[in-house]
Image: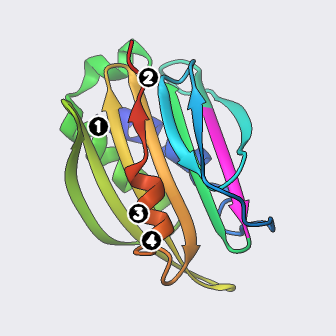
Amino acid sequence: MKTRQNVIACVLLLLAVGTLLAGCGGKADWTEFKSEEGGFSILMPGAPTEETQTQATELGDIDIHMFTYEEKDVAYIVGYNLLPAAILELSSADPMLDGACEGQVSSVNGTEVSRQTISLGAYPGRELEIRVDDADGIKTLHTRIYLVEDKLYQVLVVGGEDQSGAEDTIKFLDAFKLLEE
């Protein structure tokens, strides 16, 4: 059980690392972004950059696919990874999602502000808000995590203290959809 939580914590750490210090960019029109391979679409305020990282775990390598758009002091991120069968066999969805939340909080050395059980259609998820106090001030991470069969999706906005409830944050989080197969 601890191994599964450690693996998920590592996955979420990679998704969160580097986003606390957002880069600069111009404000663009919101457009739909689709990942056929990832099986999702989302509205983004600009064209995202794509990055894939491979994380070696005790249960096998995990490729983490991330799509990030940064502007001023806000980062919009959507990521997914395929979970190895060994992880899926270790636990059910609720402990996996809760472990993912706990892993994300600890990976950014933050404080959990809120956590809710949510769903994406028939698929379970969690909505999580984290507060991080660092040398640059207070940051918030507002995340939605979904387990869809063997994929773990994370939709995340990182920004300043008031970013979590901002209109653009909610617009981004609400826009995540699975593609029809």
The verdict on residue 102 being magenta is: no
Q: Tell me whether circle 4 and circle 2 mark residues in contact (CB < 8 Å).
A: no
Q: Quadrant of the C terminus?
A: top left
Q: Tell me whether circle 2 and circle 1 mark residues in contact (CB < 8 Å).
A: no
Question: In the image shown, does 84 or 155 lie closer to the viewer?
Answer: 155
User: Which quadrant holds residue 87?
Assistant: top left
Q: Is residue 140 visible?
A: yes
* Residue 26 location (% of width, % of height): 79, 66
Label 3 is placed on what type of residue? Ile
User: Which quadrant holds residue 72?
Assistant: bottom right
Mark 1 or mark 2, which is nearer the start of the sequence?
2
Residue corresponding to mark 1: 96
SS for dot 3: helix
Of tags 2 and 3, the one toward the viewer is 3
Label 1 is placed on what type of residue? Met
Disc on res. 167: 4
